[in-house]
């Protein structure tokens, strides 16, 4: 049967309406055709996105420290995704690997700023943190550092214990051992050189004498000359301020030279990379590290429960142990999320929240109180670690 011209026109219009209907919003989708973000209905499908940046050393020499930091951000993103949107916002972590190259870190920071992140966590090294710090200050971004830093700007928050805080733990340990004569060895990098000034005042107050001081290049592969000079001074202990791999080289040379005194190293050695370097010959080696590393050996407390929960989640995801560097990263991200939970989604408001409303924060690194200081965690998260069967041993 043939259609009349009028029927054909009606049929064509009906087809056009069906096609247009198929191009419009689908059932259950509240997004408008303009592309403006829709308010979340709690399902996560139409949530707005808020970005947090990270600048970490996933590759290069500093990856011995950066590995667990990178793993932690992956774990944190997985936990965020499982939790779903917060106040209508899906949180996305944007990680930049700066490849242990400070110049690349500056470029990475510019990239994060251009992407509109509301805060930044980083960087793995002290020198890198100093390199990108001006960018964060200029952009007025909350900058939660996972390496020691020093700034009077209200948007800079340091997740790590300062050299002063770590020195407190070292001096406590020396006094328990009745040690009064110390040889000091440090790397000639940004982290290494800041240790001695912090330690000197505490040493003087506690009648501890520094009988020798030697330095080495952070990339050196042998420190025998420096340690030979140290041995002539007859110290009762050698204190080392360096990161791996240099820290491990010093420890191996120390053992090879037959020292019969202990060596204690800073928090930059509290990682699996150091344990691997001194494997099989580590008696008398100590490191100031996180209580997280020996959590099962701690007496029962709220802190122990908190640390165990993080350790168990990390271990289930990566079949490995988290360390102090993982703790710094987790704390930085957690504090930013606390601000978002409280309804703050701009850099300015997140900064205000951290300074005025966060209060005393029980982190994985230790307790934070930014009303008191933004430049260090408290000493309660630290302990002195020994080594037994190539694993960390609680010494307190």
Image (tube, rainbow, N blue to C red):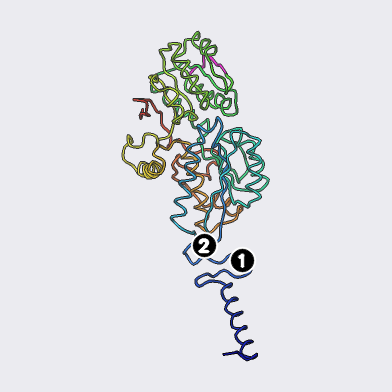
Q: Residues within 10 Å of mark 2 (few under 14, many from 20)?
A: some
Eyeballing the image, is 204 above or below 107? above
Q: Residue 1 placed where, x, y %?
A: 56, 90
What residue did someone put label 1 on? 36
Q: Residue 158 placed where, x, y %?
A: 54, 40
Eyeballing the image, is 376 above or below 8? above
What residue did someone put label 2 on? 88
* Left or right of 130, for residue 251: left
Between 149 and 309, the residue placed more toward the observer is 309
Say which residue appears at 63% left-offset and 36% top-offset: 130
Between 396 and 37, the residue placed more toward the observer is 37
Verify whether residue 210 appears in magenta: yes
Q: Residue 173 placed where, x, y %?
A: 41, 25
Q: Nearer the viewer, mark 2 or mark 1?
A: 1
Tell me, for residue 69, which label it has, or none: none
Verify whether residue 5 appears in magenta: no
Q: Secondary structure at mark 2?
A: loop
- State which tag comes first along the sequence, 2 or 1: 1
* Res 314 → quadrant: top left
| Label 2–label 1 contact, CB within 8 A | no
- Report the number of numbered marks: 2
- What is the span of residues highlighted in magenta in the rendered image? 208-215
Q: Residue 206 placed where, x, y %?
A: 47, 22
Q: Residues within 10 Å of mark 1 (few under 14, many from 20)?
A: few
Between 178 and 339, the residue placed more toward the observer is 339
* Res 384 → quadrant: top left
Q: Main secondary structure of the magenta part?
A: strand
* Left or right of 396, for residue 332: right
């Amino acid at each position: 049967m043939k259609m009349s011209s009028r029927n054909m026109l009606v049929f064509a219009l009906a087809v056009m309406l069906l096609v247009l209907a198929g191009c419009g919003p689908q059932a259950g989708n509240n997004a408008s055709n303009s592309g403006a973000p829709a308010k979340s209905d709690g399902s996560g499908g139409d949530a707005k996105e808020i970005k947090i940046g990270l600048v970490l050393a996933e590759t290069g020499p500093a990856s011995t420290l950066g590995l667990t930091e990178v793993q932690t951000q992956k774990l944190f993103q997985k936990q965020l995704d499982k939790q779903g949107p917060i106040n209508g916002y899906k949180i996305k972590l944007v990680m930049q690997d700066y490849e242990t190259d400070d110049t690349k870190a500056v470029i990475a920071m510019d990239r994060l700023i251009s992407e509109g992140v509301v805060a930044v966590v980083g960087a793995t090294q002290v020198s890198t943190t100093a390199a990108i710090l001006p960018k964060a200050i200029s952009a007025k971004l909350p900058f939660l550092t996972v390496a020691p830093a020093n700034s009077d700007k209200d948007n800079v928050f340091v997740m790590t214990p300062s050299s002063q805080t770590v020195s407190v733990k070292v001096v406590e340990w020396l006094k328990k051992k009745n040690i009064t004569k110390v040889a000091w060895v440090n790397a000639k990098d940004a982290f290494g050189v800041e240790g001695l000034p912090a330690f000197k005042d505490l040493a003087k107050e506690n009648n501890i004498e520094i009988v020798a001081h030697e330095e080495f290049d952070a990339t050196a592969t042998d420190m025998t000359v420096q340690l030979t000079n140290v041995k002539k001074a007859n110290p009762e202990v050698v204190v080392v301020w360096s990161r791996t791999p240099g820290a491990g080289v010093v420890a191996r040379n120390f053992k090879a030279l037959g020292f019969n005194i202990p060596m204690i190293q800073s928090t930059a050695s509290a990682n699996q990379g150091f344990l691997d370097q001194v494997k099989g010959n580590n008696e008398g080696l100590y490191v100031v590290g996180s209580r997280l590393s020996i959590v099962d050996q701690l007496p029962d407390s709220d802190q122990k429960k908190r640390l165990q929960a993080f350790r168990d989640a990390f271990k289930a995801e990566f079949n490995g142990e988290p360390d102090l560097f993982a703790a710094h990263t987790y704390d930085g991200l957690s504090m930013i999320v606390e601000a978002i939970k409280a309804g703050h989604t701009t850099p300015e408001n997140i900064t205000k929240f951290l300074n005025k409303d966060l209060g005393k924060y029980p982190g994985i690194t230790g307790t934070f109180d930014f009303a008191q200081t933004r430049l260090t965690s408290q000493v309660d998260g630290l302990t002195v670690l020994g080594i037994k069967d190539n694993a960390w041993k609680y010494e307190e």
